[in-house]
Image (tube, grey):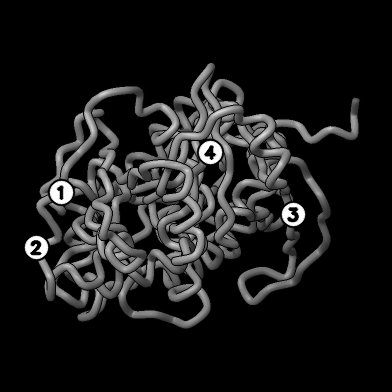
Amino acid sequence: MSLMPSTIELLARARVDLRMGLPVVLRAGDEAALAISAETLTAARLADLRGLGAPVLALTARRAETLKARAYDGDVARIILPEEADRRWIEALADPSDDLNTPMKGPLSSQREGSAGLHRLAIALVKSARLLPAAVLVPVADAANFALRHSLTSLSQAAAEPLLNESSPLHPVAAARLPMDAAEAGRLHIYRPEDGNEEHYAIEIGRPDRSKPVLARLHSACFTGDVLGSLKCDCGPQLRGALAQMGTEGAGVLLYLNQEGRGIGLANKMRAYSLQDQGFDTVEANHRLGFEDDERDFRLGSDILRKMGFSEVRLLTNNPNKIAMMENTGIKVAERVPLKVGENAFNRNYLATKAAKSGHML
């Protein structure tokens, strides 16, 4: 029946549930588990989970490394919750903000037996909801009836996991003329993903010739740099510099992708900033939070360019990963155009880390 939600729609519902502190039911064959975000977990719901069985805290291997916990499943660690563990104990393992004050969190015991498939799915889900990458799971029987009885969203691993690993298709929603400081001949295009996540934007300057390489930039949203003029990064100057160059040349496309904080979201980005204040660089801060160096999906950019009729770009970037992504997804990079702006006393170490650890060509 067409009124039934698709798996993509169930994933969107699950993200909202997790952000609100509701659990979701995850299924894989005969196995099923109730999963809830460690960040939004309440004491009352933890007690409910304990009433169903023995909960386990799923963490990424990055976070487990900081905690000196065993990640027997490679990319995931399943931490056994002691009987006396309360919500604050779980929060301390999920959130590294107090690690330096209380570095000894253990000893921690990791689960070895059984499959970690549902735990891996739970972490992918909370990541996609822009929450801390940590989830509490407890096995449940008769998953379909359990979900129905408690009005909970239920997801099949086989159906949901591929969609979480893919780039959601984007569809044009609206476009209109937008005169700007950089160029009076501006046009803003809005693209909406099918998975219910944030919309992405294409800023078209002039009337670029679709038969020639277009001057283009993939710019990830940075509220602190783009809007507030933060000196901790070079994002604001890069945004304005790219638009100014396109305005000078009379044509170009800037793709504004809503992937704040290298794809971890603004709240987690602020957590990373707090860790940087403790002496960690940007990559180390991400790892302590449980994230990879960069969680962005640049395939979104090539998808928008193709929809706009472009197949070849002169890419304004210092990031080799963007060039590789473009080439791998069928957009030819005819030229890399350097964009070296915005260095100051506050972001010098940040830029040095991008060059040393992420290969940026600075």
- Secondary element at tag 1: loop
Camera-side residue of 19 and 339: 19
Residue under label 1 = 108
Dot 1 amino acid type: Leu
Nearer to us: label 3 or label 4: 3
* Mark 1 neighbour density, 10 Å: few (under 14) some (14–19) many (20 or more): some
Q: Quadrant of the C terminus?
A: bottom left
Disc 3 target residue:
189
Return the x and y of residue 241 as percentages of the image width and height: 47, 67
Position of 35 with respect to 1 (left or right) is left
Name the residue: 60% across, 50% down. 15
From this view, report whether residue 337 is shown above or below residue 166: below
Residue 114 in the image, given as x and y percentages of width and height: 32, 23
> Residue drawn 72% across and 49% down?
191
Q: Nearer the viewer, residue 268 or 2?
A: 2
Q: Amino acid at mark 4?
A: Val
Which quarter of the picture shows residue 244? bottom right
